[in-house]
């Protein structure tokens, strides 16, 4: 009888250990699910930032192209202005510059 009671006590200890381990595993599963969700959220945020940076890069490239085009236009206008200025000078003034 004492042996039976000892076995019963041992089984109860083992059941308690199994219950504790089961609860611990369930807690770890919950924590893992939360970590996975956080990782997916972080990954989505990174992808969103990458898309945003890509859009900003495209906008910067477009602005740079517009700036370069505007600089070319300004250079062309400046050259036309100088030519017009030179061509509009009186001939006597141009002749005196050549002679000196």
Image (spheres, rainbow, N blue to C red):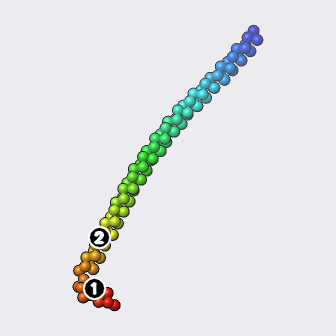
**Labelled pair 1, 2 in contact (Cβ < 8 Å):** no
Helix, strand or loop at label 1? It is: helix
**Which residue is more in the foreground, 56 or 67?**
67
Whole-number angstrom distance, CA of label 1 to CA of label 2: 23 Å
Indicate the quadrant containing the N terminus: top left, top right, bottom left or bottom right.
Answer: top right
Residue 52 lies, with reference to residue 78, above or below; the image says above
- Crowding around mark 1 (Cα neighbors within 10 Å: few <14, some 14 to 19, many 20+) is few
Discs 1/2, front: 1
- Residue at position x 24%, y 88% from top? 92
Q: Nearer the viewer, residue 34 or 85?
A: 85
Please tell me whether residue 91 is drawn above or below residue 24 in the rendered image. below
Q: Residue furthest top?
A: 1
Question: Which residue is identified by label 2?
Answer: 77
- Percent across and percent down for residue 44 are 46, 41
Residue 50: image x %, image y %?
Answer: 45, 47
Instruction: Quarter of the image for the C terminus: give it.
Output: bottom left
Residue at which label 1 appears: 94
User: What residue lies at 62% left-to-right and 23% top-to-bottom?
Assistant: 19
Judging depth in this view, the residue of 20 and 38 nearest the camera is 38
Q: Residue at x 54, y 36 (%)?
A: 35
Q: Residue at x 24, y 83 (%)?
A: 89
């Amino acid at each position: 009888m004492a042996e039976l009671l000892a076995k019963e006590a041992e089984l109860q200890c083992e059941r308690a250990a199994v219950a504790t381990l089961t609860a611990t595993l369930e807690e770890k599963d919950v924590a893992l699910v939360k970590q996975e969700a956080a990782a997916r959220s972080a990954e989505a945020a990174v992808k969103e930032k990458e898309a945003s940076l890509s859009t900003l890069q495209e906008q910067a490239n477009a602005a740079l192209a517009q700036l370069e085009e505007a600089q070319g236009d300004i250079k062309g206008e400046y050259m036309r202005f100088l030519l017009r200025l030179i061509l509009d000078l009186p001939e006597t003034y141009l002749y005196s510059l050549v002679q000196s």
